[in-house]
Amino acid sequence: MAEIVNLRQARKRLARAAAADQADANRTAFGLPKRLREAAKTERETLASRLDGRRLGKPQTDAGSNGFADTAADTATVPSTLTDGPADTRSAD
């Protein structure tokens, strides 16, 4: 004969196991000593600073999504004859 299983107790057992797994992951992620957390933070800031220092382009005051101006678009000029559109040749009778 099969063993009778109480579903409420089985669900609780599964929930406890999941909580234990989550606690283990949290201990790994947040259980670092303060000096190691600060060292990792300093390293991240240094790498971000180096990356920003190597960007091509100039910083823009009213920056877009990346904070840098598109230098090709800033210096490009369009002749006014191209922006006026086609001339209207119909008479206004």
Image (spheres, grey):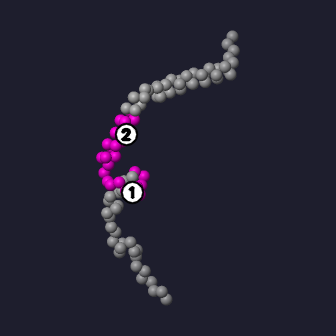
User: What secondary structure is found at the residue carrying circle 1?
Assistant: loop
Is 48 rendered above or below residue 64?
above
Query: Is residue 49 magenta-colored?
Result: yes
Spatial separation of the CA atoms under disc 2 and disc 1: 22 Å
Q: What residue type is labelled 1?
A: Thr
Which dot marks residue 29? none
Q: Disc 2, disc 1: CB below 8 Å? A: no
Identify the residue position indicated by label 2 in the image: 45
Is residue 32 shown left or right of residue 49? right
What's drawn in magenta, residue-wise? 40-66
Is 3 rendered above or below residue 52?
above
Query: Is residue 45 magenta-colored?
Result: yes
User: What secondary structure is found at the residue carrying circle 2?
Assistant: helix
Q: Which amino acid does label 2 sit on?
A: Glu
* Image location of residue 80, percent across then percent down: 35, 73
**Residue visible at 60% across and 22% down in the picture:** 16
Is 43 rendered above or below residue 56?
above
Determine the residue located farthest toward the front in the rendered image.
35
Identify the residue position indicated by label 1 in the image: 61
Q: Image quarter for residue 33?
A: top left
* Image location of residue 59, percent across then percent down: 35, 54
Determine the residue located farthest toward the bottom in the rendered image.
93
Is residue 68 shown left or right of residue 6? left
Say which label, 2 or 1, has the lower sequence index.
Answer: 2
* Image location of residue 36, percent across then percent down: 39, 28
Badge 2 density bin: few <14, some 14–19, many ≥20, Cα 10 Å? few
Is 21 rendered above or below residue 49?
above
Q: Image quarter for residue 42?
A: top left
**Residue visible at 33% across and 67% down in the picture:** 77
**Residue visible at 37% across and 56% down in the picture:** 60
Q: Which of 30 and 19 is in front in this view?
A: 30
